[in-house]
Image (cartoon, rainbow, N blue to C red):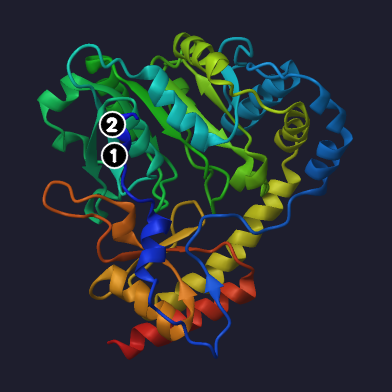
Amino acid sequence: MNPNLSLLQPYPFQKLRELFREVSPNPALTPVNLSIGEPKHATPALVTDALVANLAGLAQYPATQGSEALRSAAASWLSRRYGLRALDIQREILPVNGSREALFAFAQAVIDPSAGKPVVISPNPFYQIYEGAALLAGAEPYYVNCLADQRFQPDWASVPEAIWQRTQLVFVCSPGNPTGSVMSLNDWQDLFELSDRYGFVIASDECYSEIYFDTPPLGGLEAAATLGRDDFTNLVMFTSLSKRSNVPGMRSGFVAGDARVLEKFLLYRTYHGSAMSPAIQAASVAAWGDEAHVEHNRQLYAEKFAAVTPLIAQALDVSLPEASFYLWAKVPGDDAEFARELYREQHVTVLPGSFLARDAHGVNPGAGYIRIALVAPLADCLEAAHRVVAFARSRA
């Protein structure tokens, strides 16, 4: 067996199950689960209708590159959303089966382990796929802490020169999971300059880009174009319909960016067997072509955040994120103990922040926080918020 499998750490939800293993939640209260970032809003009818209408496509083997219709829909969305030039749908866009599998596969295609021990840089806290992808590609993960005094953005200046020289891939997530922080144009410029200097590829995870409350978050390709980098050198963005269109079970997204990098990624995916079902492709075309359901989805989240954030702020240090559907709340004492006892006393499930991070440079930047996913209906989120406040006040 691949010896690197032994390096993989338990997934955050596996840790959560272990944390709750001998805990009996309050039987007098109905459960509210706000731990998992799984959208709960209704899937749009235009998507399900397109899926059903194209089931005949199941009789065909799909092409790894996807249909021209899907790549064109993705290119049109990029132009509308970010004001980009028309991307080359043959060379600069590639459908993927959701951003999760693509982020993992991308590292396997990018990393060259033949010259020493390559490094993959990840923000910390982070989406654990980044770490697993690095380890199974034979690379060494390096964690860059995202702390409150840095706007929860990676402190690139803290990375030693020796690490940069071995770095082949940098993962970024904007809007960030779990903090909701968004990279600024200056943040992007700093990262592009580092990429030019050291030659690493940037994988920009943007799956939360369409859940925001005011200004649409800046995207990686948008930042590159603004800075005169229209060829998207060493930059690939990853996006998904899961959060945008409430279809996590469809596993549909796309990547776009540097044609040279995507040429090799397409070759990898052809062997890997990563083609998207024709029925899913047709439903995806419908989803990328419509914004009305996205605006409605965004409004539902805005209503929940407007109601819940000030309520929880009565007892915990928390504020409205720039984007995403998470609250990143500071709690008194140990975050895992807080989550466990909240579950025991109030039957509310949240995710300890330390489960989303690693001890790095003398600190676990997730310690002392909980991640609250406002994915449940408004009434459930409000009920959970009242219970969180009551619990926090009982421990004050």
Depth check, front residue: 48 or 24:
24
How many residues crowd mark 1 within 10 Å: few (<14), some (14–19), many (20+)?
few
Horizontal arrangement in the rendering, residue 103 relative to residue 38 (left or right): left
Disc 1 is placed on an element classified as: helix
Asked if 311 appears above or below 134 in the picture, the reply is: below
**Residue labelled with disc 1:** 6
Q: Is residue 37 visible?
A: yes
The number of callouts visible is 2
- Label 2 and label 1: CA atoms lie apart by 6 Å
| Image location of residue 32, percent across then percent down | 55, 74
Horizontal arrangement in the rendering, residue 365 relative to residue 248 (left or right): left
How many residues crowd mark 2 within 10 Å: few (<14), some (14–19), many (20+)?
few
Asked if 71 appears above or below 372 in the picture, the reply is: above
Q: Mark 2–mark 1 contact, CB under 8 Å?
A: yes
Checking the image for residue 3, the label placed there is 2
Residue at horizontal 27 percent and vertical 15 percent from the top: 199
| Image location of residue 383, percent across then percent down | 56, 80
Residue at horizontal 33 percent and vertical 36 percent from the top: 5
Horizontal arrangement in the rendering, residue 352 relative to residue 343 (left or right): left
**What residue type is disc 2 on?**
Pro
Q: Quadrant of the C terminus?
A: bottom left
| Image location of residue 195, percent across then percent down | 29, 20
Depth check, front residue: 370 or 72:
370
Disc 2 is placed on an element classified as: helix
Q: Quadrant of the N terminus?
A: top left
**What residue type is disc 1 on?**
Ser
Residue at horizontal 58 percent and vertical 82 percent from the top: 30
Checking the image for residue 176, the label placed there is none
Residue at horizontal 41 percent and vertical 49 percent from the top: 177
